[in-house]
Amino acid sequence: MAIKGESSLAAKRAALGNYLKMYFNKNQGVRIGETAVVSRRLHKKSPRVFPHIQILIELDAGQVFSKCTEPNRAVHIDVYHEPAQIKAVPLARRIWAAINKYLEEESDRFRQSETDELLQPSDVAGRIRLATAEAQGTVARLVGQGYDDYTEIPEDLSDHVHLVMELPESWYGLVLDLIEVTEDAIYEQGYQIRKIMGISHGFKKGVQMEEIRGFSMPFFPGKKDKDQTDNVIRVQNQKQAIMALARRLGSVEEVEDLLDSMRGNLLQRISNRPQRKRQGNLDALIDQMADAGLVDKGLLGPTLTEEGEELQNYLVGNKQEMEALLRRILRKFPKGSKRYQRFAKTQFESRSKEKINKRKVLRQDDESGSSVVAVPETVLEGAKRSLKDGLERVRISKEDVQVYGKRSYVPIDICLLVDCSASMAGDKSQAAWQLAEYLLLSSRERVAVVVFQEMNARVAVPFTRNQKRLRAGLRSVNPEGMTPLAHGLVKSLELIEETGVRNPLLVLITDGMPTYPLWTYDSKADAIKAARILIDAKIRLACIGVRSNREFLKELAAAAQGTLYIVDNLNRDTLIQVLHEEREIITSLRE
């Protein structure tokens, strides 16, 4: 049994070594297991979503950390854990023992190699640099001396163990052992490891390698290398690919539709093409899928490779799990600086730090009271008690203190009014749909979607808290045609009044100007007139648009006494940040 176990471990090492070579040759990194990121580049925690790691593809780890004169000479390994100071020397000893074990178990392979001269543990340990928040150095010096000379590491080491391995490709299988003993050392020192949700590839300044919102597709080896690939790694890559596609397309169902449209004979593929129309131009996405080994591009259109077929089968068999994972991703609030400007004509500009109800006054010890003292009422209570006690002057004691009550939660039902003209096809409309899903998953409010396109407007999704109903309505929309903005405003007003929404917020998302009128021959004037109607209906308008249309949108927002947000790009993260700010403003104004 021991021999079988050793053989299985050797096979895993070989599979991982081959897999790392394939990734590294495509200038990509990988996630190993749930806690480790491995590449030949620098790693950076995503400023927007952690635990998500960016691999900076232009910064070579060996040249930065070890001053190598040639690129691609070092492997960079980060193993993530809860914030802690991991002791470096005990970890170094574990790594030394792992090197010893690796040399013993791989001795036959090394004896057959004429080029590999690293046959002593000290030689190998001298080429592995370890760094934690507590100490750093080569494994050899940490084990031999208990310390090493300090070297500046351009990383925050409070939440991960950093390893740089300057060894030939024939030693890539050792990565598996290094990650395992590092995780064991973290546990042994009383700390928990931390799961990494995903990785992406980009540049130091934050510009993504792909233009599709950080879309990062793992590489899938072909049939030739299939038997050498560890199944655990393959499943991990399939999950990563499905999530990347789902974030780009908007849902797991859309991914399934896209894969279906590239499967089967020519007649079946042609009949499935209309399903891809609502996604806009997918040429760049298809190119990336081809580079990843999922699609073959032929004269008769793209078709799934064997790896693509396996990906679709995995999706069909694990659809619920993938949808749950996507919901967790969509629910996350994006971090980072604001990329929009706010203009408001409304009289409500101030915010209170604590949401209080001044119509409700309570004793200080009441659990439903706020921390804000009701001064007039407190003085009155003190005066009444002083008069009753026969005091000459008013004295205020602790039991006289009165506070305002906390304001109860007031739901804000949101109606998204989305421009679905031809210019919104693809990423822009997908950003609006992802905003709708985020609102549904992250709050208690109901969400509705009204779309305007061609020569009219319609309710795509009535007010709902049901995610399936939301998705079904969104899937029925195909952006095309003109921009009948006035129709959209009127249709939204009708929906809100028919539904009887008490605290409505109408959010207009558009990238263009109105191009089709409602009452006259002037589409802009009709849109302004429709916006004015919102004031009498007591519907708050938040308008989100692009810089090129700022002057018209300012006039539109002012006509409705609403708020205008000018954004650089209509993407998911910016839209969520805008809605978060707008909801905070509304909530702070409720009395």
Image (tube, rainbow, N blue to C red):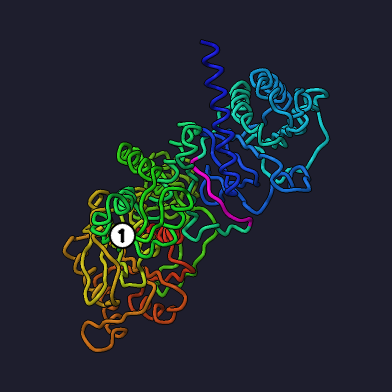
Where is residue 201 drawn, in percent x and y?
Answer: 56, 51
Q: Magenta stretch: dominant SS?
A: strand
Q: Residue furthest bottom?
A: 521
Residue 574 versus residue 245: which sits nearer the camera?
245
Q: Residue at x 81, y 22 (%)?
A: 144
Q: Is residue 209 visible?
A: yes
Where is residue 550 drawn, in percent x and y?
Answer: 44, 78
Where is residue 365 drawn, in percent x and y?
Answer: 42, 38
Q: Position of 535 compared to 586: left or right?
A: left
The local crowd at label 1, few if under 14, some if 14 to 19, many if 20 or more residues have their Cα within 10 Å, is some
Q: What is the span of residues highlighted in magenta in the rendered image?
A: 197-204
Q: Residue at x 77, y 28 (%)?
A: 117
- Report helix, strand or loop for mark 1: helix
Q: Amino acid at mark 1?
A: Arg
Q: Residue furthest left?
A: 498
448 to 4, vertically: above or below: below
Where is residue 268 drawn, in percent x and y?
Answer: 24, 54
